């Protein structure tokens, strides 16, 4: 006799039963879940106690007299033919270079800064094309004068021997780094005095310095514009005053 199993189809779950089973599963997960530890943060991301700091700035300023000058000077020559303009220019520049060396300037203090040969045009108002009527040759050198007592004499000399263009005089310092270091020291003294005053007034202690940064600026007298002209005596020169400024930013940790 064969046994034949009797399979009966179970009744389908009702929507209400499905919702109840899901709710029970969620409750079970909440019960079994382990609580996570809580950490207090101070806003710096690592949970450490924030360091109290003091940040101050101060300016150090040093005034000094310029002791050197740079000059752009040269000769512009014009002629109908380019060759003639160039020859005239070469002769005038040779005289000027010879005069500068005779005045005691070294080769390192004389450098060509610009040279050009350009056509000169005649323009017409009736629409006709412009035509070349000649050529202009310009040659300039930049000279450095390391003794300002001789500057006026040198200017007079270059004009006398043929220079017809002096574009400007720029005054400067032969050792700007020393002046800059003096300004740095002045700025640090000022910021340290300011920090001591703030710490005493706030009844806190100054700890180690966390950072130092600077901004440096050197203000030379503005270039002196001149027109070349013959003079009977040395050209009067007023070099003015040079100012070096350094701004320092310093950050301290506070100890109490």
Image (cartoon, grey):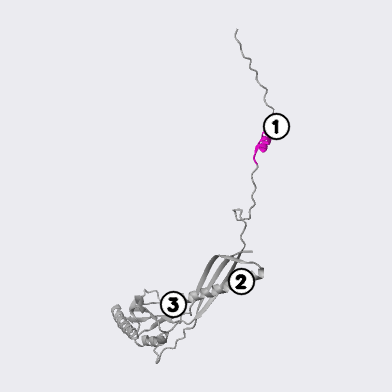
Mark before the other along the chain sequence, 3 or 1: 1
For the N terminus, the image quarter is: top right
Q: Secondary structure at mark 1?
A: helix
Foreground label between 3 and 1: 3
* Residue on which the image places disc 1: 20
Residue located beneath label 3 in the image: 175
| Residue interval drawn in magenta | 17-34
Q: Residue 165, located in which quarter of the rendered image?
A: bottom left
SS at mark 3?
Answer: loop
- Mark 2 vs mark 1: in front: 2
Q: Are marks 3 and 1 in contact (CB under 8 Å)?
A: no
The residue at the far bottom in this view is 232
**Real-space Cα distance between discs 2 and 3?**
33 Å
Q: Mark number for residue 184? A: none
Badge 2 or badge 1: first in the primary sequence: 1
Residues under labels 2 and 1: Cα distance? 72 Å
* Mark 3 to mark 1 CA distance (whole Å): 89 Å
Q: Which image quadrant for residue 199?
A: bottom right
- Residue that badge 2 annotates: 196
Q: Secondary structure at mark 2?
A: helix
Q: Nearer the viewer, residue 220 or 195?
A: 195
Within 10 Å of disc 1 (Cα), the crowding (few <14, some 14-19, many 20+) is: few
Q: Position of residue 193 (x, y in %)?
A: 59, 73
* Labels 2 & 1 near each other (Cβ < 8 A): no
């Amino acid at each position: 006799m064969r046994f034949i199993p009797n399979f009966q189809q179970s009744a389908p779950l009702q929507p209400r039963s499905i919702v109840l089973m899901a709710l029970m599963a969620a409750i079970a997960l909440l019960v079994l879940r382990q609580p996570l530890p809580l950490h207090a943060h101070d806003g710096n991301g690592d949970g450490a106690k924030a360091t109290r700091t003091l940040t101050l700035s101060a300016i150090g300023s040093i005034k000094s007299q310029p002791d050197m000058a740079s000059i752009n000077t040269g000769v512009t020559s014009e002629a109908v033919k380019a060759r003639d303009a160039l020859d005239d220019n070469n002769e005038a520049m040779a005289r000027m270079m010879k005069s500068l060396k005779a005045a005691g300037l070294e080769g390192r203090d004389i450098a060509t800064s610009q040279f050009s040969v350009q056509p000169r045009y005649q323009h017409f108002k009736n629409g006709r094309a412009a035509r070349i009527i000649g050529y202009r040759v310009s040659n300039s050198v930049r000279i450095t004068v390391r003794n300002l007592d001789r500057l006026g004499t040198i200017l007079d000399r270059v004009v006398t021997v043929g220079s017809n263009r002096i574009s400007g005089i720029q005054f400067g310092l032969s050792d700007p780094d020393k002046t800059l270091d003096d300004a740095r020291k002045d700025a640090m003294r000022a910021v340290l005095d300011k920090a001591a005053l703030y710490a005493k007034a706030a009844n806190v202690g100054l700890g180690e310095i966390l950072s130092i940064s600077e901004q440096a600026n050197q203000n030379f007298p503005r270039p002196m514009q001149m027109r070349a002209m013959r003079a009977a005596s040395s050209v009067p020169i007023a070099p003015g005053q040079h100012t070096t400024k350094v701004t320092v930013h310093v950050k301290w940790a506070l100890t109490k």
